[in-house]
Amino acid sequence: MRRPSPYIDRRGDLDIMMTPMIDVVFLLLVFFVWTTSFQIVERVLPSKLTAVSGTSPADPNEAPPPEEDFDRVVVRLLWQDGQPAWQVNDAFVPDLRRTRKRLEDIARITRNAPVILHPDPNVPLGHVIDLYDITRLVGFTKIQFAASEKI
C-alpha cells in the first residue's frame, strides 16, 4: 500500500492567472508612454551664440549669419512723421530697397520661414501692398498679416 503524499493535493490548487498580470503591465506601459516627453529640449542642443560687444545696435545692412535659424520673420511697417519706416526682426531698415535686400538675405537661408507683415493702422494701403509684393517676389510663400484685434 502506498502512503498518500502531502504534495500531490497542493499541486492541483496552484493556478496562475495571466490575464490580471497582462492588464497591469499594459496599464504601466500606457502610463509611462503618456508621461514621457518626446520633444528634444532646446537647451541641450549645441548652438553657436554670437556675443555682441558694447551697447551699440547691430548694423541693419549686415547680412544675417548663415547659421541663424529663422522661426519666423516679422516685418513691421511703421508710419513716422508722415513717412513709412521699416523693421525686419526688430532691426530698423532705412528704406524699402534695403528691406528687400534684407529679405533676400533671409530667403537665401530659408524660404520656409513664415513672414508676418505687421503694419501700423495709419499706414496707407499702398505701402502695405508694396511690402507684400516684395515678400512674394523674394520667394516667401507663407505670408501672414498680424491682427491687432481678435476677429
Image (spheres, helix red, strand yellow):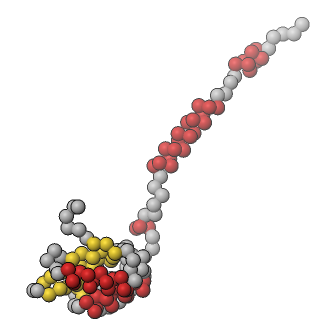
Quadrant of the drawing holding the N terminus: top right
Say left or right for 142 vs 2: left
Which residue occupies the foreground of this view, 132 or 120? 132
Question: Can residue 48 be seen in this snapshot?
Answer: no
Residue 112 at x, y percent in the picture: 42, 76
Residue 95 at x, y percent in the picture: 23, 91
Which residue occupies the foreground of this view, 104 or 129? 129
Question: What residue appears at the point 28 percent right and 88 percent down from the top-left corner?
Answer: 99
Quadrant of the drawing holding the C terminus: bottom left
Say left or right for 72 vs 125: right
Question: What residue appears at the point 69 percent right and 22 percent down from the top-left corner?
Answer: 14
Examine the rendered structure and indicate whether residue 141 appears above or below residue 35: below
Say left or right for 16 vs 116: right
Which residue occupies the foreground of this view, 3 or 147? 147
Question: What residue appears at the point 29 percent right and 81 percent down from the top-left corner?
Answer: 132
Question: Can residue 115 be seen in this snapshot?
Answer: yes
Residue at the far left in the pictured view: 81
Residue at the far top in the pictured view: 1
Residue 83 at x, y percent in the picture: 14, 87
Q: Quadrant of residue 42?
A: bottom left
Q: How many marks?
A: 0
Which residue occupies the foreground of this view, 1 or 100? 100
Residue 35 at x, y percent in the picture: 45, 49
